[in-house]
Amino acid sequence: MRLLKILIMVVMVMGFNPIQDGDWQGLNIALEKLFFTNAEAKSTKVTTKKTGSVSARKTVTIKNDASSEIADGNNIDVKIQGVDDGQGVSLYVDGGSDENVTIPDTGIIYKTQAKIAVPSSYFLDLRGIYVDSDDQRYTADVAVLHDIDGNTITLTNLDETNNVGTAGPIAGGRDQSGAFSASSWIHFFFIYNPVTGDVSSLSSASPTAPTLPTGYTFFVRVGTAYFTSGSVLLLSYQMGDLVTYNIQWVKWDSHADSTNESIDVSAYIPTTAKLIHGTMGLSAGTTARKMRVSANWAGAIWAGALCDAQGTGDVSYGVSGEKNFTLPILASQTLYWSTETNNDIYAVGITGFTDDL
């Protein structure tokens, strides 16, 4: 009990605030201040047992820094007894040959309460780059891949180019022998062979279930690109989950035939998109007019503008009174719009989308 008395006296003299039940970080800090010494490089485990009002059992792994001032490294059980008189907590050694518990400042490892593993689809500095009509390149500093059982693996410094014209299933090409259909979306993946350690890419018509080449069991979707009616990739650039391209006009010199008329944007955003980004304004005319674009039929989520007049009516010069918008995708690959008149003087363009990676 000698250590117990010393600890209580030190806690009172140093004026520590009481440590609440379950406050393990506070306990670590108190132990650091009470027992810190320079320590040699070895690992010691300190286990806190349920005693009195302590609510759970915790194990903290401690790596000590280098020095010769360290206990013998044996496992030590530390019991924690809460004190309700505002004086702090009592600590004492149970089952250890030493009377001191050493926890160096540099040796404490903090973990989340749930010990959550980094999930699949986690990226750092993910980029998708158009190379040419049938090649798409993806890079990332870090990517977490998964297998069909949910196991994950973290890869670093990835740089893979995929050719959608290469028959497969094959690493670096597509996951099917036949060519992809024109006017469709192609999804790209990082793939990994755990036996050989090879990293590669794969293109697929499926966003969730690509046919993996032999030996490759880990995969993760990293992007999507449109395969045009001419069977070439649409030029785009991706940063993280944001895909951007030159404006794709879905309505130009047009008008809505009814209130909240639907707009098919399936050629501009994939089924995996969660946000759509675009622009709206007048394509022609001499008088300011109102229009709006919305995410749902009722128009509860919408973007609108009072557009200024302009007379060129030429897509090469853009639109007047232009307003950019970002809307959630509430109906798959669909937007809604309304216009003030039935004159063909309105324009809506799509500039990109945020993918649900």
Image (cartoon, rainbow, N blue to C red):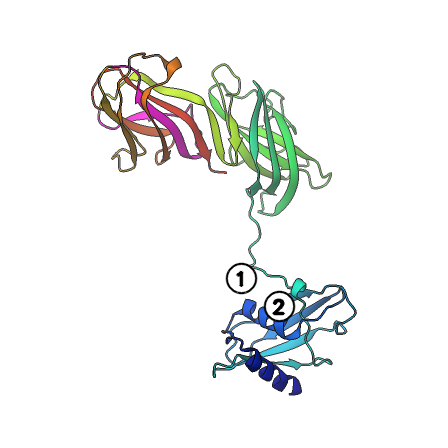
Residue at 33% from the left image edge and 29% from the top image edge: 335
Circle 1/circle 2 CB separation < 8 Å: no
Can you say whether 67 is above or below 201 in the image?
below
Instruction: Please state the horizontal and vertical placement of residue 265, each as a whole percent of the image.
Output: 38, 25
Residue at 79% from the left image edge and 69% from the top image edge: 68
Quadrant the N terminus occupies: bottom right
Q: Locate residue 328: give its quadrant.
A: top left
Q: Which residue is mark 2?
A: 59
Instruction: Please state the horizontal and vertical placement of residue 218, each as a whole percent of the image.
Output: 62, 40
Residue toward you, 173 or 175:
173
Residue 283 is covered by the magenta coloring: yes
Query: Total label count?
Result: 2
Residue 142 seen in the figure? yes
Q: Which residue is mark 1?
A: 113
Can you say whether 140 is above or below 97 in the image?
above
Badge 2: residue crowd in 10 Å (few <14, some 14–19, many ≥20): few
Q: Amino acid at mark 2?
A: Thr
Residue 228 is covered by the magenta coloring: no
Badge 1: residue crowd in 10 Å (few <14, some 14–19, many ≥20): few
Side of 7 where 206 appears, left or right = left
- Stretch in magenta: 259-285
Q: Amino acid at mark 1?
A: Gln
Instruction: Please state the horizontal and vertical placement of residue 199, each as a whole percent of the image.
Output: 67, 35
